[in-house]
Image (tube, rainbow, N blue to C red):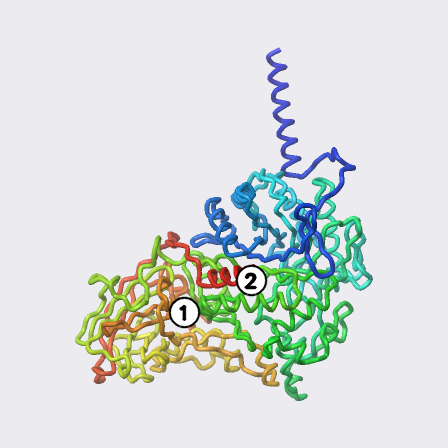
Amino acid sequence: MVKKFVIGMCAAVVLLFVLNYAYYHLGIYIDFRPDAPVTTFMKTDEDTIYMEKDGEYEPFEIRGVNMGVGIPGQWATDYAIDEETYLRWFEQIREMGANTIRVYTILQEDFYNAFYEYNTRQEEQGKEPLYLIHGVWVNDYVLNSHRSAYDDEFMQTLMDDCRSVVDILHGKKSLSLGYGLGSGSYRKDVSSWVIGYIIGVEWEDLTVAYTDETYPEKDHYTGKYMYTTEDASPFEAMLCQTGDKMIEYESERYKQQRLVAFSNWPTTDPFIYTDNVTSFFMKCAYVDVDHIKTTDAFISGYFASYHVYPYYPDYMNYILHPVDFSENTASDMGDITFPSQQADNGTFYQEALTGDEKTDYYDSSGRANTYYAYLKMLNRHHDIPVVISEYGVSTGRGMAQRDQNTGRNQGHMSEDEQGRALIECYEDIMDAGCAGSCVFTWQDEWFKRTWNTMHAVDLDNTPYWSDYQTNEQYFGLLAFDPGGKESVCYVDGDTSEWKKEDVVLKNDEGTLSIKYDEKFLYFYIDMQDFDPQKDVLYIPIDTTPKTGSTYCQNYDLSFTRDCDFVICINGRSESRVTVQERYEVLRAMYMNETQNEDPYLDVPDTGTSVFKRINLLLQTATPLLTGNWESNAETYETGLLRYGNANPESRNFDSLADFIFTKDGGVEIRLPWQLLNFSNPSEMMIHDDYYEHYGVENLHIEEMYVGLASSQDYSGHRIEMEPFELEGWGKTVTYHERLKESYYILKDYWASADR
């Protein structure tokens, strides 16, 4: 009997395990309510989204904020944000005036537990909850691989993830940690606050084109909830099938439906542009969700989702300001078959315009505003509501792109400028007739990279320092500043934080003190009788033992050892950092783009006395501005130093300020690590000699040397250089949260708009 009992108990445990695994892991279920009605609390018409409240459907504006998963010292896939942090952030987002959070992929269970707790508490107190738009991610490696969208690793994985997202939001999923996905036992049903799904990501145009070319026969799909029109492409048919199966799964298992959208962006928008624009931007793919229709069985709503930024790619600016191309310059592009001559499913952009230039390209203030023009095009084209699910600008010191018309650039915008730019973008979005929008993004993310600086940094260690030159890290409304409670230094003219032990060098002209943290090297110079109105201050810096010069011909300065950089403080508008030509990373990496020359054919001497201004490459369609396909790429001087007060507590706070004169005749300076060619300061790694390695390789240093001189006392003598010890912090970072000025600007604007 005992033996049978034990066997029976073991069998029962195994059965329970199998049933649990089948239900929570595999999503296997038995529908005990096959005839139960399907419900929804979200609906749409041709241009508006509605939410059910007290039995009535009312217009609902999606006023959202995108939320990433990165915090300092952690990669996004570490999912290190805890429940307490999410609860604090939800409250701040709600107080700002947003009503929706958008996430891109499956997160760890802490997010959903916090979301459930926050909204439950809000409703118990009679307050409005936060709503959620949940994304379904596509793996970057699959999207950028040789696979088409019909490959199992693409389409089947996407469908499986759609089912997982549905189960997670209904609190019926167990998920083990996988690449790009969170993990946990998801038991909180948050579905009552989930207004919709955005399936997919910013599509890789080559993947779309490859799919359409490879599977021309798969250009149609008819499902219970979604079907394609006769104009659909194979890629659009794949999207249609994925959306249909996601709706079907939620309808049958949970008897619910909610809004559905497919991600898109200008690179794969539905429009065919002029030949020169098409050629330069190599636009080869079109995704038009108007080729996907819904049946009466889909009682919820369908909307078009776009990521649209003011600066990329600003197709409309080059249509508004066309230039003539000669036969010779156009032929430099080679033999081109323009997509406008062969596209079957694209729509000529003129069809979404009125034909009146003033109406099409200018806003109500009379300003050329091609961002607004593009948004209007999208709304005119689509027969369903349009949501701009990403828009934003960065407060990073580095910049990658300029908005030629409104100045809303990708980077090098102060926190104040960010706030005002977000308001302008929001107003353009709403004036264009969009049904909602989501700011990108809630928090800064140290792990991010940008195309025009990624060559200069150690990509395996980006979460462990705050790279102010990489604009992609600073789109957030919430900043992570170094230091547990406050930063080690603030460049604000107050010298009380500087101590005797910070002094590195002392000579007849004054003293030089240095500090550093995860974001900046700080300098304080206390000079004798220094007059910032007429005197010039020089700080030579030696970092690398490989190159450098004992003479700088630009400023006619001599040093006791080889020098790599010179900081020149010359008034409020002409102060800058210069770099020895041999150690200029832009020359080594982008000389072909900027000067149409090979940097490795005529290499600068290791001891050259020429010092260059420090520039960053910009992604600008210069051929479309000049009419010459061979136009050099545009750059801007990132080594130019900005005067101002960099203390967030100051009324005159300027988040981009690099230096300030102190009341007692001194100077405070802060420099981002990358500006001095540090590739990973957490381990004190700098750039090695580019011309030994044909590119950027890392070199470890334990000290750098600095000097000090001023124009009033310099007589041609060699400037003494003293060592400053450098010790990295490894993977142990310090930081504290700070809401940016832009947060409060947006909060005040939304509050006034709601009154």
Q: Residues under labels 1 and 2: Cα distance?
A: 29 Å
- Residue 183 visible to an observer of this rendering: no
Instruction: Tell me whether circle 1 and circle 2 mark residues in contact (CB < 8 Å).
Output: no
> Is 356 positioned to the left or the right of 511 in the image?
right
The residue mark sitting in front, 1 or 2, is 2
Quarter of the picture holding the C terminus:
bottom right
Choose between 509 and 14: the one closer to the eye: 509
Image quadrant assignment for residue 177: top right
| x and y, in percent, of residue 247 in the image | 72, 48
Q: Amino acid at mark 2?
A: Ala
Q: Residue at x 52, y 51 (%)?
A: 77
Comparing 610 with 59, the one in front is 59
Side (left or right) of 479 relative to 381: left
Q: Is residue 81 left or right of residue 491?
A: right
Quarter of the rendering containing residue 250: top right
Establish if 117 lies above or below 690.
Answer: above
x then y, percent, for residue 171: 61, 39
**Residue 505 at x, y percent in the picture:** 21, 69
Q: Amino acid at mark 1?
A: Leu
Q: Is residue 17 placed above or below 198 in the rendered structure?
A: above
Q: Which residue is mark 1?
A: 656
User: In the displayed image of the protein, which residue is found farthest to the left?
Assistant: 508
Name the residue rendered at 59%, 82% in the picture: 625
Q: Earlier in the sequence, mark 1 or mark 2?
A: 1
Q: Which residue is mark 2?
A: 753
Extreme residue in the front direction: 755
Q: Position of residue 473 (x, y in %)?
A: 48, 62
How many residues crowd mark 2 within 10 Å: few (<14), some (14–19), many (20+)? few
Q: Quadrant of residue 374?
A: bottom right
